Image: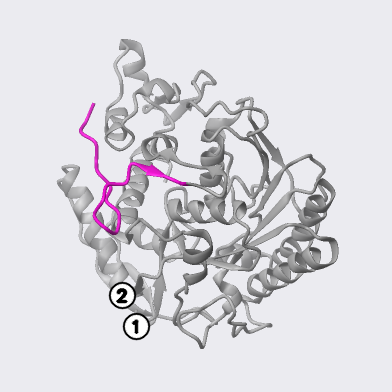
């Protein structure tokens, strides 16, 4: 097996596990177990290797990051001559914790087949809980959770949250809503409807089942902020009629509704305001800056930066976000909580960092035809695009004992390897 690739946190210590054991909820899992779920190919064998019984080189490449044997990998066969794939159900599920019935929670995750939802589902499944995923697959994809389909603790339901849904559960993570500008602007009315009606239906479910309810709100509730960094008690500076309003105001009214149910009906609620997050399984074509830059750099194309590149963003890695969501759900903090990384970059500097890491990964992997991308400025800025965005995470630090562990550099390197593997596999 190839030598393991070490991941170091902000203090230079090696990250071997993600999660924690706090608030009476143990959510710590080995990092390699999680990586084995997303840094793995959809197939292990090509048709010629399947005949001889050899393993494909892709399995060894992924083993450097996951340190797992092929026992939990898909046994699907790829036919390169016809560019077709023969799928199989013959794969063993990764090991999950065996919990006593009293410790095993029934957890509903809406939008669980999306980018953030699928990583949350992976963590909750490895921890041994019973997980039901609701998704209408508008932006989510079955492939993000397909490795759990058929598991006795897992259920996947195609359902739109604007319609009521009946189930018995202990916790509800309400993530369902398109979150990138091209997707939420595609049908602005539907986006508002999802934010309001979807939240209304899930809060109604929480009221009936007495489940704890967590909604993933967004830093967009602050709009184009006049306060920097943004604390939770800042009311925001939002254009209520602009092209982004369907999402910004949709999330703001969803928060209003959530606290309405808390005050009026005693529903146990949590509100997470998520700042820019990146990681494997991000849709490469959803218009977000991280995925845009990485795919352009991997293809050797120009990296396109809007405006002069002086606008700032802060980026957190997906594992830090999942830690924050689980901490908030199981804590006693009922006020809104910012979950984000305070490390701020100008977009121009970030583009240069992505280019550097892509070149580093390609060099390490022995690529001979490395094309260094040019960074191109002065593309027109999107309407109402905020100039500055950085969270004040004091509340998360004090109430949840949470702070980001992953450096932007380490997270980017893992994401570059994920996209690179997808390109080699032909699925990107």
**The magenta stretch spans which residues?**
1-20
Image height of 183 relative to 22, above or below = below
Q: x and y percent of residue 355 in the render?
A: 25, 62
**Residue 49 appears in which quarter of the rendering?**
top left
Instruction: Give the residue at mark 2.
Output: 348
Residue 13 at least partly seen: yes
Q: x and y percent of residue 185 in the render?
A: 63, 68
Instruction: Give the residue at mark 1.
Output: 308
The answer to the question of whether label 1 and label 2 lie on touching residues, with beta carbons closer than 8 A, is yes
Judge by depth and name the residue closer to the eye, 351 or 407: 407
Majority secondary structure of the magenta segment? loop
Quadrant containing the N terminus in the rendered view: top left
Q: Is residue 354 left or right of residue 162?
A: left
Q: CA distance from mark 1 to mark 2?
A: 8 Å
For residue 149, the mark is none
Q: x and y percent of residue 93 in the render?
A: 51, 24
Q: Is residue 81 magenta?
A: no
Judge by depth and name the residue closer to the eye, 28 or 219: 28
Rendered residue at 75%/59% (across/down): 199
**Residue 9 appears in which quarter of the rendering?**
bottom left
Colour logic: one colour
Judge by depth and name the residue closer to the eye, 359 or 253: 253
Badge 1 crowding class, 10 Å Cα cut-off, few under 14, some 14 to 19, many 20 or more, is some
Badge 2 crowding class, 10 Å Cα cut-off, few under 14, some 14 to 19, many 20 or more, is many
SS at badge 1: loop
Q: Is residue 18 magenta?
A: yes
């Amino acid at each position: 097996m190839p030598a393991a690739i070490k991941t170091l946190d902000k203090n230079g210590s090696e990250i071997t596990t993600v999660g924690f054991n706090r608030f009476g909820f143990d959510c710590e899992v080995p990092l390699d177990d999680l990586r084995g779920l997303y840094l793995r190919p959809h197939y292990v064998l090509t048709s010629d290797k399947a005949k001889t019984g050899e393993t494909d080189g892709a399995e060894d490449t992924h083993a450097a990051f996951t340190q797992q044997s092929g026992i939990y990998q898909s046994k699907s066969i790829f036919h390169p001559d016809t560019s077709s794939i023969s799928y199989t159900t013959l794969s063993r599920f990764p090991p999950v914790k065996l919990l006593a019935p009293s410790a095993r929670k029934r957890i509903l995750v809406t939008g669980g087949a999306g980018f953030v939802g699928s990583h949350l589902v992976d963590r909750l499944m490895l921890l041994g809980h019973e997980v039901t995923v609701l998704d209408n697959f508008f932006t989510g994809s079955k492939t993000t959770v397909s490795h759990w389909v058929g598991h006795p603790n897992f259920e996947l339901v195609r359902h739109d949250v604007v319609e009521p849904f009946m189930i018995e559960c202990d916790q509800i993570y309400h993530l369902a809503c398109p979150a990138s500008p091209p997707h939420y602007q595609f049908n602005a009315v539907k986006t508002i409807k999802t934010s309001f009606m979807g939240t209304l239906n899930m809060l109604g479910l929480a009221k009936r089942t007495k489940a704890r309810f967590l909604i993933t709100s967004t830093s967009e509730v602050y709009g184009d902020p006049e306060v920097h960094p943004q604390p939770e008690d800042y009311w925001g500076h939002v254009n209520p009629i602009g092209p982004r309003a369907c999402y910004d105001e949709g999330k703001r009214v969803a928060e209003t509704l959530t606290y309405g149910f808390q005050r009026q009906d005693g529903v146990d609620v949590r509100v997470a305001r998520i700042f820019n997050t990146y990681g494997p399984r991000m849709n490469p074509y959803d218009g977000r800056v991280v995925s845009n830059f990485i795919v352009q750099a991997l293809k050797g194309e120009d990296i396109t930066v809007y405006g002069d590149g002086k606008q700032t963003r802060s980026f957190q890695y997906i594992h830090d976000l999942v830690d924050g969501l689980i901490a908030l759900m199981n804590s006693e903090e009922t006020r809104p909580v910012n979950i984000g990384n305070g490390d701020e970059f100008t977009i121009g500097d970030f583009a240069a960092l992505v280019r550097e890491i892509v070149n580093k990964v390609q060099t390490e992997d022995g690529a001979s035809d490395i094309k260094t991308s040019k960074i191109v400025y002065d593309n027109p800025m999107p309407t109402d695009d905020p100039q500055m965005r950085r969270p004040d995470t004091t509340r998360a630090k004090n109430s949840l004992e949470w702070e980001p562990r992953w450096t932007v550099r380490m997270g980017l390197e893992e994401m570059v390897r994920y996209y690179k593997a997808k390109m080699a596999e032909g699925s990107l």
